[in-house]
Image (cartoon, rainbow, N blue to C red):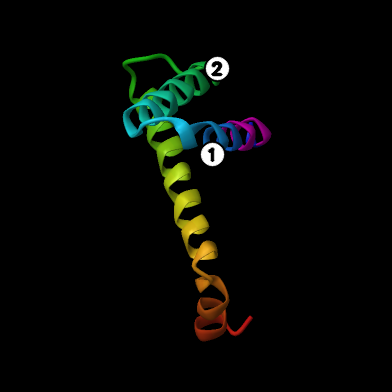
Amino acid sequence: MKKYFILLTCILIVGCSTLSKEERLALEAKIDHEECLSLGFKEETEAYGGCRLTLKSIRSQDKTTQAIRSNGLDDRFCRRWYYC
């Protein structure tokens, strides 16, 4: 599953650069829907909602991580708080 999600994320990053925000969000929703169905969750259930929320959370964390790395903040944070 992890490889599948990474592949989908890469496709979204490359493909979404030419898509509008609404198109990108619709594509992400469709991919999440298909992923949750492929994992065996049924629509209109609490478990399906949890699956969708988890995928959205993972995508948000990935965006935050990319933003931190692109701004060069990861090294400063590491040295300041964790003494890496």
Residue, disc 1: 13
Looking at the picture, does residue 69 appear above or below residue 8?
below
Looking at the rendered structure, the secondary structure element under dot 2 is helix
Quarter of the image that includes the C terminus: bottom right
Residue 54 rendering spot, x and y as whole percentages: 43, 38
* 61 to the left or right of 6: left
As rendered, which of 64 and 44 lies closer to the eye? 64
**Where is residue 2, by image quadrant?**
top right
Label disc, if present, on residue 52 of the rendered structure: none
Looking at the picture, does residue 63 appear above or below residue 54?
below
Quarter of the image that includes the N terminus: top right
Residue, disc 2: 38
Looking at the picture, does residue 45 appear above or below residue 57?
above
Number of marks in the rendered image: 2
Task: Tell me which amino acid carries mark 1.
Answer: Ile
Q: Residue at coordinates 54% horizontally, 71% vertically from top-left?
A: 74
Labels 1, 2: front one? 1
Looking at the rendered structure, the secondary structure element under dot 1 is helix
Residue 39 rendering spot, x and y as whole percentages: 55, 21
Magenta segment: 3-8
As rendered, which of 38 and 65 lies closer to the eye? 65
Task: Looking at the image, tell me whether mark 1 or mark 2 is earlier in sequence order.
Answer: 1
Q: CA separation, marks 1 and 2?
A: 22 Å
**Where is residue 8, by image quadrant?**
top right
The secondary structure that dominates the magenta segment is: helix
Q: Residue at coordinates 50% horizontally, 77% vertically from top-left?
A: 77
* 82 to the left or right of 63: right
* 75 to the left or right of 59: right
Neighbour class for label 2 at 10 Å: few (<14), some, many (≥20)? Answer: few
Residue 53 rendering spot, x and y as whole percentages: 38, 35
Task: Tell me which amino acid carries mark 2.
Answer: Ser
